[in-house]
Image: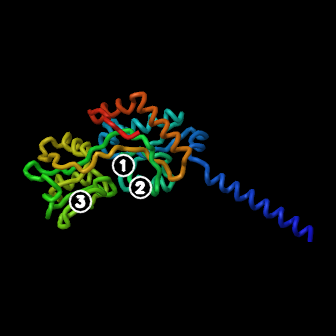
Amino acid sequence: MHEFKRDFLRLTLAGAMLMAGFGTAQAQSALDQIVKTKVVRIGIPADYPPYGFVGTDMQPQGLDVDMARYIGAALNARVELVPVSSTNRIPYLQSGKVDIMVSTLARNVEREKVIDFTKTAYSPFISGVYAGKDMSIKSMADLAGKSIGVTRGTIEDQTVTGVLPTDAKILRFEDHAATMSAFASGQVQAVGISQPAVEALLRRNPEMAIEYKLPISLSPNFIGVPKGDAALLDKVEQIVREARSSGEVERLSVKWLKRPAGDLPK
């Protein structure tokens, strides 16, 4: 009987130690792997100038790309830039395809359920309704019966869905290039999109008759990390705060957006 109790206690203790080890493995931060391998995978936009795009030298560039490289340098790690779209940004974080996401992410309640964000923003973001110069739009009500294009999964998509008249037709596209192409081809009469995306289109097509009509949001950009990875989140938050205090955030805003960063959350 005593032997049975002794064996039972031994097995119970072994099981407890196994579960404790499992919990430690589960709680391990991506930061540990970054420190060990000196490599960090960061998601960046690939088709969204001036935040992220491919330059004439076929290399990624833009505000988010520069910020990703800044984070990599602060982590003393080589950066692997992973191009993402507005629809796969969050799934890439959730599935572990990237360690950090620097891709014009606005922080909202729904997203905070599945990923974590820095408290400190790293850049401003302006979006609105744009349409032809000959179209009079003074309020969302003026879009009644009209078609408006948005990029799926963006802040514009989420915002206009709840404020447009019921008879307005929303067409969703997979990336910003497709959204702007839809406007250029006459597939939609207006677009809900960011100021940088429109400016990029106008640089290529200066003759296009499109202009800003209404604001949609003035939502700053935050950096995302996998849900529950407190160690990585704290480290990235520290890096962004240092970028703010050193003037790096302001420098990148002036360089890429041609405007000051302004009063960002911190």
**Side (left or right) of 134 relative to 28:** left
Residue reaching furthest to the bottom: 1
Q: Is residue 30 above or below residue 189?
A: above
Amino acid type, label 1 = Ala
Q: Is residue 124 above or below residue 189?
A: above
| Residue situated in front as seen by the camera: 169 or 166 | 166
x and y percentages locating residue 230 in the rendered image: 54, 47
* Earlier sequence position, callout 1 versus callout 2: 1
Q: Is residue 20 visible from the viewing direction of this image?
A: yes
Amino acid type, label 2 = Arg
Q: Secondary structure at mark 2?
A: helix
Q: Which residue is mark 3?
A: 163
- Can you tell which quarter of the image residue 81 is in? top left
- Using the numbered discs, state the Cα–Cα distance from disc 1 to disc 3 in whole angstroms: 18 Å
Instruction: Name the front one of labels 3 and 2.
Output: 3
Q: Which residue is mark 2?
A: 111
Q: Mark 2 Cα within 10 Å, few/some/many (few <14, many 20+)?
A: some
Q: Is the N terminus in the top left, top right, bottom left or bottom right quadrant?
A: bottom right
